[in-house]
Image (cartoon, grey):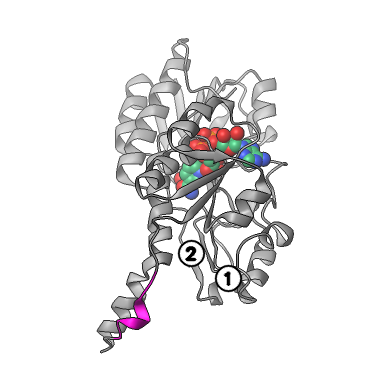
Amino acid sequence: MKIVVSELIWEEGLQILSELGNVVYDANLWKQDLARELVDADALVVRNQTRVTRELIQAAPRLKVIGRLGVGLDNIDLAAAREAGIPVVYARNANAISVAEYVFAAMLTFARRLEEATAHVKGGGWNRRLYTRMELYGKTLGLIGTGEIGTRLAYRAQAFGMKILGYDPFVPPYEVACTEFGVQLTDLKTVLSQADFVSLHVPLNNATRNLINRETLSLMKPSAYLINTARGGVVNEEDLYNVLREGKIGGAALDVLAQEPPQDSPLFKLDNVILTPHIAGLTEEAQVKTSVLVAQEVVKILRGEPSSCVVR
Ligand SMILES: NC(=O)c1ccc[n+]([C@@H]2O[C@H](COP(=O)([O-])OP(=O)(O)OC[C@H]3O[C@@H](n4cnc5c(N)ncnc54)[C@H](O)[C@@H]3O)[C@@H](O)[C@H]2O)c1
Ligand SMILES: O=C(O)CC[C@@H](O)C(=O)O
């Protein structure tokens, strides 16, 4: 078996793959001539930067499985994989806790401004009144998408005494969790207009691209914060920039951008923006879990065994 891994994988996952076959691994392979490497490959394992296009799939006549070291599948042509009879397995739920904790870090950063207060003290200041901030207790968290991450975030927000509103038109699989974790399911307009923090947890697809735009942003309270750990394409960045510059919302935390890595962006110049390099799911714990899970599921498919992580 030849297993090609074109992006970063943790050692624990590599070990499992190596027991089954010959692993060709280079974290930068996605930037190189991947099609040539796939001519005789049985499996391809990617993260989010490899564009698994129809052409790439057609260049891999022996391919039996595609493994995605993560959750978002917007970089894989799922229709082409399906037509070619190639199952795609992914790390469902493996990084959900990490992303939920990142959202808390962002909310608490906006609520308490510890970095600014630290800079103030290190610069010789001691103005306590200047750093009087707010509690998360009693504030409203608005979830757009109440799947694996959304419901884990709700569980944590409930413990903080937050009110939780959720919008998800396809919620049935998570309805029980929503009820248990206090999510009041409602429409998009209500979530946007009532939340103090709006957090995005939807996949990027034709229905969600630019879901957050000038019109939807205008529904948010002037004091509210937007947190995007989903995909850059879900937010129209130009509209967000204008709304932030005009002070029409309180701020935004963006872990994901439409172009990654970004070229220079006007967002860099704004004080009310937190920007991180797509790290919400990037903790040691989540990455070990992700690498092991995907490696195990790839191995199952190559052995002809059923996998519970196949994309439907
Ligand atoms: N920044 C990171 O490191 C990171 C890590 C993990 C996942 N993600 C992103 O977060 C997304 C969500 O992950 P998840 O594990 O919660 O996925 P999930 O599939 O468990 O949940 C997604 C939810 O979105 C809902 N949804 C789909 N279309 C919608 C729409 N138009 N409006 C409202 N809701 C809609 C679905 O019904 C589902 O409940 C992923 O697709 C991925 O793009 C980012
Ligand atoms: O693959 C990655 O490193 C990003 C992870 C995250 O965006 C995901 O969709 O799981």
Q: Is residue 221 magenta?
A: no
Q: Earlier in the sequence, mark 2 or mark 1?
A: 1
The mark found on residue 275 in the picture is 2
**The residue under label 2 is which amino acid type?**
Leu
Tell me the CA gap for discs 2 and 1. 9 Å
Q: How many marks?
A: 2
Q: Magenta region: which residues?
A: 127-133
Q: The C terminus appears in which quarter of the rendering? A: top right
> Residue 266, how many percent across, how many down?
61, 73
Q: Quadrant of residue 223?
A: bottom right
Q: Is residue 128 magenta?
A: yes
Q: Say which element carries label 2.
A: strand
> Residue 89, how many percent across, how many down?
51, 26
User: Pointer 1: residues within 10 angstroms few (<14), some, or many (20+)?
Assistant: many
Q: Residue at x 60, y 21 (%)?
A: 86
User: Which residue does the numbered mark 1 point to in the structure image?
Assistant: 267
Report if the CB atoms under discs 2 and 1 are less than 8 Å apart: yes
Q: Residue at x 69, y 65 (%)?
A: 239
Q: Residue at x 45, y 23 (%)?
A: 298
Q: Give 184 or 229, whichever is nearer the viewer.
A: 184
Q: Give 55 or 242, whichever is nearer the viewer.
A: 242
Q: The N terminus appears in which quarter of the rendering? A: top left
> Residue 140, how many percent across, how many down?
50, 53
Q: Please say if 73 is above or below 277.
A: above
Q: Say which element carries label 1.
A: helix
